[in-house]
Amino acid sequence: MFDVMKNYEEMTTSEKKVLSYIVENQDQIPHIKISDLAEETFVSKTVIINLAQKLGFSGFREMKYHISRTILEKMSKQENQTVMYREVLKQSIDKTFSLVTEEQLLETAAKIKAAKNVFIMARGTSKAAGHYLEHLLLTIGIQCIFIKDYNLSEVFTDFVAEDDIVIFISISGDTKKIIDTAKKIHLKKAEMVSITSFRTNELTSYTTNNLFCYTDKANTSKNDTISRTGFFLTIDLLIDKLANI
């Protein structure tokens, strides 16, 4: 907004009280009259004018104009961010459709259908997609086990057999726990499916079927709020194939 600490030590108690009110009620300032502000803060108009000048403005009107401009710029920035994010989501959907082929979906669906046991593994925010896949598989009559507990990701590999299938869901495809588990399953020669973002990643070197979705970012170590829209779309397409074979 503006440098609220400018000449702060030189302000009177009354001026500091007005400044505190302005900082806490920025949205109201563009619509308030100097007389109303004086009444709200129990000071004189002179106190408000003196405060504005100590903050570097010619008077209350210029300070009010500056606050109004700041609020408008903030609203415009938020609106642009909303539009940009809508475009990111639209791009995720459109590009995921182009990445997932009918042949890949059909081949993966056939292997899931033929498997004796279906296991699902996901970590972090991607667990939401794991829950979604588990729910849909059970809904169409395919029994599956979603490894939700972090500690069980070590134990369950002992039960995986050659006629089972494990589905890994990971945006980066480089999550250490996922990779370590994939290596163990790979030794057991069980079928493995990866659902990851469209990029070179270690997980796909172990899995037998790879389904890709589009994300604008893939590194979740610093930002795990990356949209999983592509995951949910890929899962929906896969479930549709499973339901019709």
Image (spheres, helix red, strand yellow):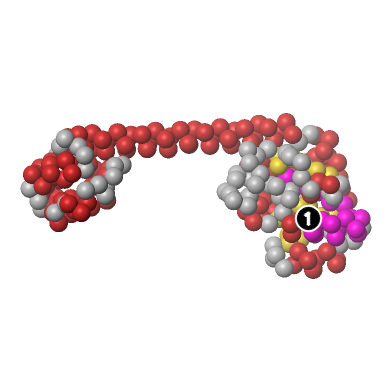
Label 1: how many residues lie within 10 Å, few (<14), some (14-19) or many (20+)?
A: some
| 2 relative to 62 in the view: left or right | right
Question: Relative to 146, does residue 239 appear above or below in the rendering?
Answer: above
Closest to the observer, 182 or 50:
50
Residue under the point 29% across and 33% down: 69
Kindly tell me whether residue 100 is visible in this rendering.
yes
Q: Is residue 181 magenta?
A: yes
Q: Which residue is denoted by mark 1 in the rendering?
A: 179
Q: Amino acid at mark 1?
A: Ile
Q: Residue 209 falls in which quadrant of the image?
A: top right
Image coordinates for residue 4, horizontal then vertical, percent: 26, 47
State the SS at label 1.
Answer: helix
Q: Is residue 123 magenta?
A: no
Quarter that holds the C terminus = top right
Image coordinates for residue 191, horizontal then vertical, percent: 87, 52
| 53 relative to 190 in the view: left or right | left
Image coordinates for residue 28, horizontal then vertical, percent: 24, 43
Residue under the point 76% across and 64% down: 153
Residue under the point 16% across and 41% down: 53
Write the start and end of the magenta stretch as one range.
179-196
Image coordinates for residue 64, horizontal then vertical, percent: 21, 37
Closest to the observer, 112 or 101:
101
Closest to the observer, 77 or 147:
77
Kindly tell me whether residue 115 is visible in this rendering.
no
Q: Residue 106 falls in which quadrant of the image?
A: top right
Residue under the point 85% across and 66% down: 159
| 19 relative to 82 in the view: left or right | left
| 63 relative to 174 in the view: left or right | left
